[in-house]
Amino acid sequence: MKRIAVDMDEVVADVLPKFLTLFEQFNGRRPSEEEHLGKKLYQLPGGENLRQALFEKGFFADLQLIPGAQAGIQTLMDQGYEIFFVTAAQEFRNSFEDKYDWLLRHFPSISWKNFVFCGDKSIILTDYLIDDHAFNLRTFSGKGLLFTAPHNISETEFTRVNNWAEVLAFFEQENLANGAR
């Protein structure tokens, strides 16, 4: 059985709307998409305080789902893939419980045994990793898929998937190339 590691933030959980709301609260305006293409919102002038929100209990508790993520994960499971959620939670100590509960609520068919909270994703030994950060894919030993987010728009090093429909299309092609499951 092939294994897929799936990052949480900006792959299945949408952090951007919450950051945009906080940016507006702090600055009285929302940044345009052009302002933050190729960077994180907290790298913008006026965004310096946003990163602090990641350390607060509850920040990760109510994130929106990325469209298509639930159905996409279920389709991959139905095709025989084993799914692991892999998230770098150590940096934000208060995120553990929020992320754990969020995953249980939105992906109840995935066992808690398939939740991996780590700091360095190079330890992950799955066949595939879907992540929004190229630095995680650079140290990964399997096939990395870069999930599009505004901050990674200029990355060209990895196979890019813009949404969950493209993730499923990628794995459909993989199945055809490797013989149907």
Image: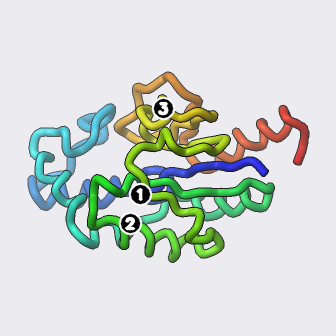
Can you see residue 166? no
**Res. 150 mark:** none
The image position of residue 46, as x and y in percent, is: 10, 45
Disc on the earlier residue, 1 or 2: 1
What kind of element bears circle 2?
loop
The image position of residue 39, as x and y in percent, is: 28, 35
Q: Residues within 10 Å of mark 1 (few under 14, many from 20)?
A: some
Q: For marks 2 and 3, give the one nearer the viewer.
A: 3
What kind of element bears circle 3?
loop
Q: CA distance from mark 2 to mark 3?
A: 27 Å
Q: Nearer the viewer, residue 137 or 11?
A: 137
* Residue type at numbered disc 3: Thr
Can you see residue 99? yes
**Res. 139 mark:** 3
Residue at the spot of label 2: 63
Relative placement, left or right, of 93 versus 64 is: left
* Residue type at numbered disc 1: Asp
Would you say the residues marked 1 and 2 are in contact, meaning their CB atoms lie under 8 Å apart? yes
Would you say the residues marked 2 and 3 are in contact, meaning their CB atoms lie under 8 Å apart? no
Based on the displayed image, in which of its 4 quarters is residue 20 positioned?
A: bottom left
Residue at the spot of label 1: 14
Would you say the residues marked 1 and 3 are in contact, meaning their CB atoms lie under 8 Å apart? no
Relative placement, left or right, of 15 versus 176 is: left
* Residue type at numbered disc 2: Leu
25 versus 147 height, above or below? below
Q: CA distance from mark 1 to mark 3?
A: 24 Å
Based on the displayed image, in which of its 4 quarters is residue 129 positioned?
A: top right
Q: Residue at x 36, y 57 (%)?
A: 89
Q: For marks 1 and 3, give the one nearer the viewer.
A: 3
Relative placement, left or right, of 70 versus 147 is: right
Q: Residue at x 28, y 72 (%)?
A: 58
